[in-house]
Amino acid sequence: GAGVSQSPRYKVAKRGQDVALRCDPISGHVSLFWYQQALGQGPEFLTYFQNEAQLDKSGLPSDRFFAERPEGSVSTLKIQRTQQEDSAVYLCASSSGGARDNQPQHFGDGTRLSIL
Amino acid sequence: GNSVTQMEGPVTLSEEAFLTINCTYTATGYPSLFWYVQYPGEGLQLLLKATKADDKGSNKGFEATYRKETTSFHLEKGSVQVSDSAVYFCALWAGGTSYGKLTFGQGTILTVHP
């Protein structure tokens, strides 16, 4: 497709389980971002990739959160030993420019994660 | 640090009413400012942007002017439609070493009735 694709759209997991969320950016886009959006709040930055390099992971809330983009295209956000406070919508965005190019970010529809 | 504050919602209007959603920001340097819209069940879409002071961004009848003196970027539309019902987010990009990440406000829910 032409847009950013995220899967699954919905994920329910029990507390303590590991989850993996996938993002397919727009083809050829250099930059990829992950955001976390709690209910009723704006998205908050988690991490940034330029191609396969993770240049900023300052927003990851704990060492249970891990992201990768090994070939510079598809990215996976993994959360280990999930907690109830991890329940949120996880958004992926991509842009054609590099980190300092201020190109528009194109967002996927997000993955809604619910931890029971 | 950088932050964005939006007016409290929700906002409920009748069709053809005038819309203002206030947004103020705190940032070092000269950020770029954005409005994103999220329609029900969909992802965030860029609505408009402004990259320097006194710039006016516009799209689909919406406008916002970058006011550095008041650190504001208020969203306006002269005549809203039912199809404008959505959540609106103000955001900034601080540039520099921020690696392109956006800082968002909390969002304002807009409901337009026929």
Image (tube, rainbow, N blue to C red):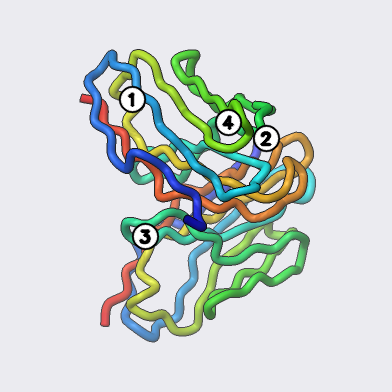
Residue A35's mark?
none
Label 3 resides on the chain identified as: B
User: On the same chain: label 1 and label 2?
Assistant: yes
Image depth: mark 4 or mark 3 in front: 4
Say which element carries label 3: strand
Question: Label 1 vs label 2: CA separation?
Answer: 30 Å
Verify CB contact (< 8 Å) between mark 2 and mark 4.
no
Image depth: mark 2 or mark 4 in front: 2
Residue highlighted by disc 4: A47
Q: Give percent across and percent down for residue A41.
A: 41, 44
**Residue nearer the viewer, B26 or A41:** A41
Q: Amino acid at mark 3?
A: Ile
Residue highlighted by disc 3: B109
Label 2 resides on the chain identified as: A
User: On the same chain: label 1 and label 3?
Assistant: no
Image depth: mark 2 or mark 3 in front: 2
Q: Give percent across and percent down for residue A64.
A: 44, 15
Verify CB contact (< 8 Å) between mark 1 and mark 2.
no
**Circle nearer the N terminus (4, 1):** 4
Residue A19 lies left or right of residue B29; in this view the side is left
Question: Label 4 vs label 1: CA separation?
Answer: 18 Å
Residue A51's mark?
2
Say which element carries label 1: helix
The residue that appears at 37% across and 57% down in the rendered structure is B42
Q: Amino acid at mark 4?
A: Thr
Question: Label 2 vs label 3: CA separation?
Answer: 35 Å
Up the image or down, B79 lies above or below B41; here it is below
Q: Amino acid at mark 1?
A: Glu
Residue highlighted by disc 1: A85
